[in-house]
Amino acid sequence: MTLPQVVPGVPGPATAAREADNPARLLELANQRISLMWNRLAGPCQVGRDASLRVGVDLGTANVVVAVLDERGEPLAAALESARVVRDGLVVDYLGAVRIIRRLVADLEERLDRKLARAACAIPPGTGAGAERVTANVVEAAGLEVTGVLDEPTAAAALLEIKDGAVVDVGGGTTGISVLRGGRVIYTADEPTGGTHFTLVLAGHLNVSFEEAEAIKLGGRASREIAPVLHPVVEKVASIVQRHLTAHPARTVYLVGGAVALPGMAAVIASYLGVPVYTPAHPLLVTPMGIALLSAPQGG
């Protein structure tokens, strides 16, 4: 899999902050775009009939997300659906995945009043050519021409416009890591620990079903009652990141993916690494927006 450069040919609002090497300001500017997209998960969106669009499909372990940006990379609309069609970065329910993408695309086409014809997609780093082919086949079977298959943390880095640092994508099934130097990806890795493991630990502790544990994890109890139960899994994620970044150090780390919304995760990882760790707003949307940003645009 070819590793793309960060936002090739696409200007972003964080350029000045990136040049000033100010991670906090960089994140602030990225958060503005992410929050705007979060507010566009429902409802109509006006877009010109001839405007170019960039579309990204993120087939995650817990959620499938389709994001649409304009040619400049600004948010237009997104749609998501909870799903269990992927496990540890691999598609395990082909037809289910196709149906979900079709539903999300149909919803977006109605809201945008535009036909979506092409999209990029992504897989966790290290899952191999087989995963790349299957993921692309799913997206194509849903009616979209695939313009590229990326690795997930690299796509996240594109949206955040990171020049130097590391992106850690803690998804439902895996933790992916990308390290960047001078705007180039120099290292990627992926290990099978993610949000699903949090849910399994919680289900065992509370003696409830996986579905009940997932609902509790995503609810308000996570910050008050269950965070101590999940702390050992958070430390496992931190140790994974520490091991990979020991050989490929980064001065700043950014956490993305739905699982990093767990309170306290950034602080634990920072304590292992000894460097600043940032979590963007609505981290679930970072990777799909990055995939869209790196996709080839489609015209009207």
Image (cartoon, grey):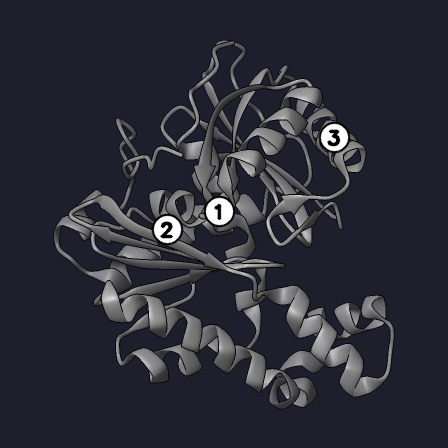
Mark 3 lies on a secondary structure that is helix
Above or below: residue 97 compared with residue 278: above
**Residue at which label 1 appears:** 287
Amino acid type indicated by mark 1: Thr
Check residue 256 in the rendering and tell me which mark sits there, or answer none.
Answer: none
Q: Position of residue 153 (x, y in %)?
A: 42, 50
Mark 1 lies on a secondary structure that is helix
Amino acid type indicated by mark 2: Ala
Amino acid type indicated by mark 3: Val
Q: Earlier in the sequence, mark 1 or mark 2?
A: 2
Q: Position of residue 82 (x, y in %)?
A: 74, 50
Q: Disc 3 and disc 1: Cα gap in Å?
A: 20 Å
Q: Position of residue 7 (x, y in %)?
A: 30, 35
- Viewer-side residue, 69 vs 205: 205
- Viewer-side residue, 265 vs 177: 177
**Residue at which label 3 appears:** 98
- Mark yes or no: residue 150 visible: yes
Quadrant (top left/top right/bottom left/bottom right) for the N terminus: top left
Instruction: Say whether marks 1 and 2 touch (CB < 8 Å).
Output: no
Above or below: residue 219 compared with residue 192: below
Q: Position of residue 163 (x, y in %)?
A: 21, 49
Q: Earlier in the sequence, mark 3 or mark 1?
A: 3
Q: Disc 2 and disc 3: Cα gap in Å?
A: 30 Å
The 10 Å Cα crowd at callout 3, few under 14, some 14 to 19, many 20 or more, is some
Residue under the image location 70 percent in, 79 percent down? 201
Instruction: Say whether marks 3 and 1 touch (CB < 8 Å).
Output: no
Residue under the image location 15 percent in, 47 percent down? 182
**Residue at which label 2 appears:** 30
Q: Earlier in the sequence, mark 2 or mark 3?
A: 2
